[in-house]
Every structure is written in structure tokens, then in C-alpha cells.
Image: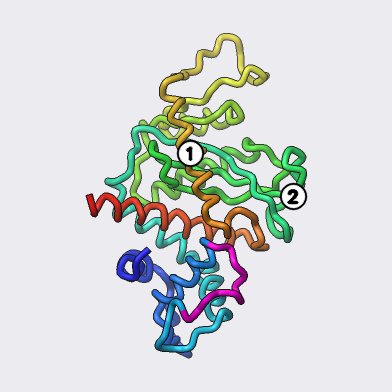
Amino acid sequence: MDKGTIEELIVPHLSKGKRGFKSKIPSCQVVMAIFYRLKTGCQWRELPLKQFTDTVEMSWESVYYYFNKWGKDGSWRSAWIALLRSKRALLDLSSMQLDGSHTAAKRGGQAVGYQGRKASKTSNALFLSDNTGLMLALSEPQAGQHHDLYQIKTLFTELCSLLKEAGIDSRGIFLNADPGFDSKELRSACIEKEIEANIKPNPRNKEKDEDENWYFDEELYKRRTVIEHANAWMDGFKGLVMRYKVLTRNWMAMHWMAFLVFFLQRINKQTKV
């Protein structure tokens, strides 16, 4: 990501101190160092700081300070919402895709629990993407022992609220989800949000009544693979492959940053065409 893009579309949404000591390090250089850490997964103390600045002295402690500060005050989330709002015309909202993803958590922390299928402690989060696999929203992570439907109505409302903040009208959009999300609770939430649920029926679902006739379009459901590809692309950020962040807010901040990178890369490609 180039310096000009960062200064134009990210830096304006990062908080700045109103009083006290003013940093001599340009925010753009700090952001570039944080993105380097996200991409490589290196330790903070191993950041090649001279690669990002040759005018002022920058320490890894100061880079981490700003990452933590911007995660705590919601700056990364604000930057993502602002980008979605300003560039929402580039989204393909002919359908949305919903999926959950477990991440191994080696240091424990908030929202961490043992997941038998992974044979390790994990965190589980829900992701929402557009019809091309561009990530749109992320839910608050849950402890790994819980399945995807745990607190689904609350978490789904959280995802939809972010879209609303970004000025995205989700009414009438088709939502694809796999059989693991087949539940009356999620279908009810979709009805309340006026979203068309295209959830593949789960034959083991004991909630379903014989007289219920739920809508399902097999051809539309094939589009759900794009969010699986998107989750695979997320693994390209080594800082996200394994969770080492103890606080969920910092873990979520790293995802907002990854979302920013993906969308900005798409914008740059479309600009060059």
C-alpha cells in the first residue's frame, strides 16, 4: 500500500492527542510499520524501523503504543467504516455471504476456549462478505467451544449494525450461509432485517417443522465459496494466522486493518484499469 493512499484514506480517521506531547513521527510512517507487522507476523521488537523512516528516530515501543491506542479508541474500526461508506458503490451486494472461522489462540486471553475439532484453544468469529468475497464486517469473537449459532441473533445484529453505520442498506439482499447456520433464530433475525435468507437446510435440524417451506436457491448458494476464499486470503497476513493478542479489541483491530488493505488493493486495481 502506497504512502499517498494511507495519508488520504486512513490517517484522517486515526485519533490524535489534543494536549501534551506531540509526536514527531508522521502517522503515515507508524501505520506502514504496523501493516508490516500484520503482514509478516514478526515480533514488535523485530520491526525494521529504518525501512519506514530516515528523518526521525522511531522505536518499536512507540509503534506498538499507537497500534494499541488506535485499537482501544476504535480508530481502526472507524477507518474501515469510513472507507466502506465512501466506496460502497464498488461493492457487489447482489448477495452477501456469512461464515464463521476459528483461530488458534496460543496465549489465551479474552474469548478463548478449547475446541475439540481443532484440538486446541481457539476464538471463533463471524464474517460477512459481499458477492465477490470482499470482507464487510466482523463480529465480536466468541470462545472456541461455542458453535457458530451461539448468540447468533446478537452477533448478526452487530454485523448488520456496522453495515448501517457505513450507509449500506441491507434490506432485500440475499444472504448465503451453510447448514451450520440453519436455525429459526437466524432466519427470524433475517426477517426482522428484511434480508432474504438463503441458508442450506440442515437435515439434522430438529427445529424444523414438516409444514415449513424455507426458501433455498442452490445456484445462488454456490456463491458462498467466495467467503471461504476470502478467509484463505486472510491467512496471507501472518499476524492473523495465529492469535497472540490477549485482548479481543486488538485482535479485531488487526482484522479491520486487513479489511482495509484488501479493499484499498481492489480500489487501486480498478483505478489502473
Q: Is residue 145 left or right of residue 87?
A: right
Query: How far apart are the two marked residues, 1 and 2, measured between alpha carbons?
Result: 23 Å
Residue drawn at x 48%, y 66% is: 35
**On the rendered structure, is 242 left or right of 269?**
right
Q: Position of residue 1 (x, y in %)?
A: 38, 63
In x, y percent, where is residue 180? 61, 29
The magenta region covers 40-50
Tell me the residue that label 1 is attached to: 227
Q: Is residue 48 magenta?
A: yes
Compared to residue 62, the image places residue 192 above or below, namely: above
Q: Is residue 240 magenta?
A: no
Pointer 1 or 2: first along the chain: 2
Relative to 214, say whether 190 is above or below.
below
Specify the label residue 121 is tagged with: 2
Question: Residue 174 at what x, y percent from top left?
Answer: 40, 30
Residue shown at 29% from the left, 52% from the top: 269
Q: Which mark is residue 79?
A: none
Report x, y in % for residue 163. 41, 47
Of residues 213 and 123, the one nearer the viewer is: 123
Q: Residue at x 39, y 74 (%)?
A: 28
Give the residue type that dot 2 points to. Answer: Lys
Compared with 80, 27 (above or below) is: below
